[in-house]
Image (cartoon, helix red, strand yellow):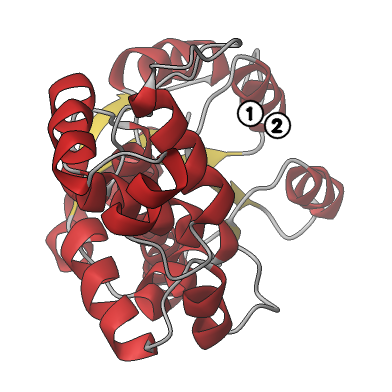
Amino acid sequence: MIKVVVVEDEMLVKKGLILTTDWHRFNCEVVGEASNGMEGIEVVKNMNPDIVITDVRMAGLDGIKMIEALKKEGCKSEFIIISGYSEFEYARQALKLGVRDFLVKPIDDEDLYNALSRTCEEIQNKKTIDKIQNKMDDLTDSRVMLFKEYIIPEQVEDNDYTAKAIKYIKENYQKDISLKSAADSLFISESYLSRVFKANVGQTFLDYLTYYRIKQACKLLQEADVKIHEVASMVGYKDQRYFSVIFKKLVGISPKEFRNKLN
């Protein structure tokens, strides 16, 4: 559910918003309310809502000053402000603060629902992106290829074949490489490299290569001017369809969906 806090000093307006709005239509629930800016700051800090609907002009600390104070403390909520027709300057200041939308008193139901619809859509997009980013940051979930990269020592010993194989992957992942080509470059057998690699890294050579390639692809897909087939080629996949299958298996969504969510 999307959490909402309402900050309004006019009791009838506040209760009207809370009690008569069809919050479930937008998958929302009101988790807190306040009657002025100071109370609003405390409620927002405690409840961490997704949306704050606030009046502009309130006794004590007004809505603009409340938003400024919350933004300074890193508040991530989306704000919808309520203002009167004569309070254009307040609305202008609010837009500078990145307020998502503003409503004019008396509040029209259609305007309110349109504002909620736009804001909730933006929040859902942010949550989707955050979910992807959380996956990207979660090193325990190898299925989204956020594996723990093997740390290569500054000085690689002659018999440290694992470190040399990792270095080989990082320098040649764009090419058509394999366990055999890596073993050949180290002048050792495939079976020996396979055994020591799995013992030290905890993954097979092919798994590590695949995860590393897809991780690089995630970075490249953030660049809108690079086409998906180009990304596939740049990380060592000649067949874009095969690349997309591997990408979706590890990340959970297709390369196109991944790019769309990030952009």
Q: Quadrant of residue 225?
A: bottom right
Q: Residues within 10 Å of mark 1 (few under 14, many from 20)?
A: many
Residue 67 is marked as 1
Q: What residue is rendered at 29% in x and 42% in y?
A: 135
Circles 1 and 2: CB atoms closer than 8 Å? yes
Q: What residue is rendered at 38% in x and 45% in y?
A: 130
Residue 253 is marked as none
When the figure is inspected, residue 112 is found, relative to residue 158, above or below; the finding is below
Q: CA distance from mark 1 to mark 2?
A: 5 Å
Image location (x, y in percent) of residue 195: 12, 32
Residue 64 is marked as 2
SS category of the residue bearing label 2: helix
When the figure is inspected, residue 89 is found, relative to residue 226, above or below; the finding is above
The kind of residue on which mark 1 rests is: Ile
Q: Residues within 10 Å of mark 2 (few under 14, many from 20)?
A: many
SS category of the residue bearing label 1: helix
Give the left or right position of residue 226, taking residue 124 as reference. Answer: right
Image location (x, y in percent) of residue 117: 37, 70
Residue toward you, 48 or 115: 48
Q: What residue is rendered at 29% in x and 68% in y?
A: 247
Residue toward you, 153 or 51: 153
Which part of the image, by quadrant, shows the C terminus?
A: bottom right
Q: What residue is rendered at 17% in x and 68% in y?
A: 25
Q: How many numbered marks are there?
A: 2
Give the left or right position of residue 74, taking residue 8 as reference. Answer: right
When the figure is inspected, residue 227 is found, relative to residue 183, above or below; the finding is below
Image location (x, y in percent) of residue 92: 83, 51
Residue toward you, 41 or 56: 41
Q: Residue furthest right?
A: 89
When the figure is inspected, residue 54 is found, relative to residue 60, above or below; the finding is below
The kind of residue on which mark 2 rests is: Ile
Q: Quadrant of residue 227?
A: bottom right
